[in-house]
Image (cartoon, rainbow, N blue to C red):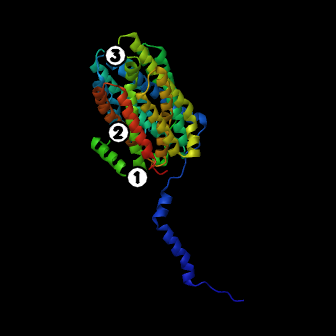
Amino acid sequence: MTTTTPTLPEIEAPQSALESILSTKDFDTITSQPIETLPRKTFWQLLNISIGFLGIQFAWAIQMGQMSPLLESLGSVAWLTSLIWCAGPVTGIIVQPIVGSWSDKTWTFLGRRRPFLLVGALLTAMSLIIMPNSPNLLVAAVLLWILDASINISQGPYRSLVPDTVPKKQQAFTYSLMSFTIGLGSVAAFYIGSIIPNMHNLFYLGAISMLVAMGWTIITTPESKREENQAKSTNPEGFKAFIKQTWDSIAEMSPETKKLCLMHSFTWFGLQCLFIFFPLYVTHNLFHTTDTHSPIYHHGVQIASFCYVILNIVCFVVSPFLGKLCEVFSSKAVHTFGLLCLSLGLLSSFFLTSPEQAMWAMGIIGVGWATTLSVPFAMLAHQVPPGKEGVLMGTFNIFIAAPQFVASTLAGFIVMQTGNDASALILGGLSVLFSAIYLQTVKE
């Protein structure tokens, strides 16, 4: 029997093919993908991570329900109230990206994110305690800026805590749990606001809630120093370096990430119109009073708070199911439905004639509020490069804060021109409707 020895070309062919594969960009891309090393979390561990947002949202809810009436009681008018509300978006644009980038490069005995959660919680609590004792409009305005900056110190690194500590397959569910605790915090704050007219007590309760809830998350959520996340404690690189890093972060975004950012911007334009003018809309349009000292006015503020209770009860009920719904129908389909509900609720303000109808409208808005708080972040989390979680989440917040700033400067002017707070809500509804339409261009 004779055997045939393979010729040299026959031996080299597979080797050449292997070299060809190894040299391709596709292979480099595949091998550069991080291997999931995070252990799967239990439900209770994921809930512990999310509890801190209960305190954050309690503070936001006190601001949404009480701040515009407080400013009006100190002599503010629509356009000035709207400008003072620029505190939120401006501090969001400046603080969250800086703090997010700083937390990417910092490691302390508490970890990367938790030091910022702690500092933000302490400053927020102090601001909430002082706020209702403001002697004049200027002091209240300054305190609002300090309060919003403090909340943003915690909120930016907080969202980055999820990709740091939670496996990718559980991140969508974690963000939905955060939406759940946000809804719970809002329900508690607005319900208390609807039955307790004492503004001082409401702000004090907000301070306590922030400290307890954020403290729980800090204590129960350890951070592990993974290889790709190792970073020595450093100082910020300076404002110019931050601007360049943020600009580079935007420039390096994928086309779909940029679409998500733009879509989210139009959503938050509409939400800012709601936050600023809904309590005033209820007192002015449904209770027909502008007398901040009358019992009817204070009853209107309480009814507005109860409307927010309904909104957040819906958010509270819907949020736990969002992760599963996104798996069944896709994240884009779920969020599109939410945005349509949000738009419908805002646009209906033109036709409302009673507090009961306002409650129904806010219930519809609650569906869109629930998806807005979780689904876009889950969609974004899949595109976050390791080690860039903080800066990308902070940059994403610019596309939340910038439209809020535009709404704060534009909506008050429109209300002054039309003499009707409903005009701001209708403008917001149209913006959210465009957001729902534009979302259809995003590829998952």
Report the front residue among 351 and 417. Answer: 351
- The mark found on residue 98 in the picture is 2
Q: Earlier in the sequence, mark 1 or mark 2?
A: 2
Q: Amino acid at mark 3?
A: Thr
Between label 3 and label 1, give the one nearer the viewer. Answer: 3
Report the front residue among 347 and 440. Answer: 347
Element class at badge 1: helix
- The mark found on residue 235 in the picture is none
| Total tally of numbered discs in the picture | 3
In the picture, measured across the screen, residue 142 lies left or right of residue 25, that is: left
- The residue that label 3 is drawn on is 290
Q: Are marks 3 and 2 in contact (CB under 8 Å)?
A: no
At a point 38% along the width and 44% down the height, the residue shown is 262
* Percent coordinates x, y for residue 148 in the rendering: 36, 28
The image quadrant that residue 6 belongs to is bottom right
Between label 3 and label 2, give the one nearer the viewer. Answer: 3
In the picture, measured across the screen, residue 10 lies left or right of residue 20, that is: right
Using the image, determine if residue 394 lies above or below residue 296: below
Element class at badge 2: helix
C-alpha gap between disc 3 and disc 2: 40 Å
Q: Amino acid at mark 1?
A: Pro
* Percent coordinates x, y for residue 18 in the rendering: 53, 71
At a point 30% along the width and 16% down the height, the residue shown is 74
* Percent coordinates x, y for residue 210 in the rendering: 46, 25
Report the front residue among 114 and 214. Answer: 214
The image quadrant that residue 242 belongs to is top left
Q: Are marks 3 and 1 in contact (CB under 8 Å)?
A: no
Q: Earlier in the sequence, mark 3 or mark 1?
A: 1
